Image (cartoon, grey):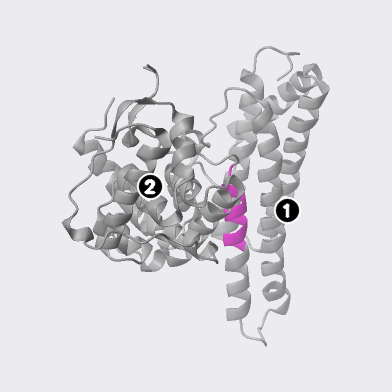
């Protein structure tokens, strides 16, 4: 059953309360946060890092850094978003050698909003493989925006790039994904 | 045409639980870092040199034990069907408010579960039995370490938390062993 907005608000408030408790050194509160968020953080790390062992290392490191930073946590953006920022930083730091990226469209701001619906269904494993095969920049933007629902501005901030660059990477990801899956994306 | 696939990127699962429980390693790092920061914050000529020197060491030892419990628990978890693969949040959450000092009812129930576990363990296939027994041994070892450390520093909140968490880990293994049901089945 989908979560109502009231339930969502309760969950968010609960996270905030736990985060404050954990920030005061309550390890049990932090374990609850870990239990609640580990799957999403690991999913994010796995898609960005493309390696199961690296994703687990990054997830672990993200939670340890979060624990250290919790006393300074301010609930402006929500605990989950804050945690995702940390996880993205950990993955990016791990990529010591940046991959060579192809040039992006010259005017990314002119690009419209994207939808991500395939013209025919795609098997889960097939699409995961296609996503994993994308260049880092395009894949990062796709994972954060199309999968985790962040805006180009938010994803750009997380990735340390301009929102326009992030949007351009999204378009590139869409083109590459359509070509690799041999399907139209409406 | 394939009708069983997904139609949009948004249908991809955003929650992908890690292949193992990362919490024990995270908890161990947290404990070790706390111990290190306490040690570095302590003045060199503390009035109570024994306690000042022993508590961080005890915490390191406990952290190592907890990490071992995590490894042992993982072995048990991998071999026991039906255990929450995403972690132990529900079970942990329901008992988090338990008193730090085990009550008489808890002690009695724990003893009964341990006796029952002996019987059930004997009926398990050798490989599974070895894994579950190793988990329980690791837990026993961690409990001894934590209780010894609490003997040195009874008011240490982190040690108290670790004690409760370790008892919870033990209960999870024992409960799961009890509900496994099909004794003798290779699991």
Q: Main secondary structure of the magenta part?
A: helix
Task: Decide whether residue B28 is among the magenta residues.
Answer: yes
Identity of the residue drawn at 69% across and 59% down: B149
Residue A132 appearing in the image: yes
Chain letter belonging to callout 1: B
Q: Circle 1 sits on which residue?
A: B145
Task: Decide whether residue B3 is among the magenta residues.
Answer: no
Real-space CA distance between mark 1 and mark 2, rounded to the nearest whole angstrom = 44 Å
Q: Which residues are magenta?
A: B21-31
Q: Circle 2 sits on which residue?
A: A143
Closest to the observer, A145 or A15: A145
Instruction: Name the side, left or right, on which A104 lies relative to B31.
Output: left
- Occupied quadrant, residue A169: bottom left
Q: Residues within 10 Å of mark 1 (few under 14, many from 20)?
A: many
Q: Position of residue B25 (x, y in %)?
A: 62, 52
Q: Dot 2: what SS?
A: helix
Label ID, residue A121: none
């Amino acid at each position: 059953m989908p979560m109502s907005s009231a339930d969502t608000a309760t969950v968010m408030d609960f996270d905030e309360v736990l985060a404050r408790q954990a920030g005061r050194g309550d390890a049990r509160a932090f374990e609850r946060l870990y239990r609640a968020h580990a799957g999403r953080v690991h999913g994010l790390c796995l898609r960005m890092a493309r390696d199961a062992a690296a994703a687990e290392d990054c997830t672990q490191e993200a939670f340890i850094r979060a624990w250290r930073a919790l006393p300074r946590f301010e609930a402006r953006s929500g605990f989950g978003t804050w945690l995702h920022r940390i996880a993205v930083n950990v993955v990016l730091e791990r990529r010591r050698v940046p991959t060579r990226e192809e040039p992006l469209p010259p005017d990314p701001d002119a690009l419209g909003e994207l939808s991500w619906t395939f013209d025919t269904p795609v098997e889960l494993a097939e699409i995961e493989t296609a996503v994993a095969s994308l260049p880092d920049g395009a894949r990062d933007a796709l994972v954060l925006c199309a999968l985790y629902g962040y805006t180009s501005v938010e994803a750009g901030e997380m990735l340390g790039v301009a929102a326009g660059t992030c949007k351009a990477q999204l378009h590139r990801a869409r083109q590459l994904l359509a070509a690799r899956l041999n399907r139209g994306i409406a | 045409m394939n009708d069983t696939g997904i139609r949009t990127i948004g249908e991809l699962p955003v929650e992908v639980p890690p292949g193992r429980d990362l919490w024990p390693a995270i908890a161990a790092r947290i404990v070790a870092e706390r111990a290190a920061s306490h040690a570095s914050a302590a003045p060199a000529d503390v009035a109570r040199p024994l306690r000042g020197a022993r508590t961080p060491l005890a915490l390191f030892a406990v952290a190592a034990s907890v990490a071992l419990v995590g490894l042992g628990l993982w072995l048990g978890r991998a071999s026991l069907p039906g255990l929450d693969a995403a972690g132990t949040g529900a079970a942990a959450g329901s008992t988090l408010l338990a008193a730090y000092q085990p009550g008489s009812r808890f002690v009695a129930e724990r003893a009964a579960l341990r006796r029952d576990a002996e019987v059930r363990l004997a009926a398990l296939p050798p490989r599974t039995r070895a894994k579950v027994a190793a988990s329980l041994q690791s837990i026993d070892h961690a409990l001894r370490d934590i209780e010894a450390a609490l003997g040195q520093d009874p008011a240490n909140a982190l040690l108290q938390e670790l004690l409760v968490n370790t008892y919870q880990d033990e209960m999870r293994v024992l409960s799961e062993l009890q509900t496994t049901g099909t004794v003798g089945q290779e699991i």
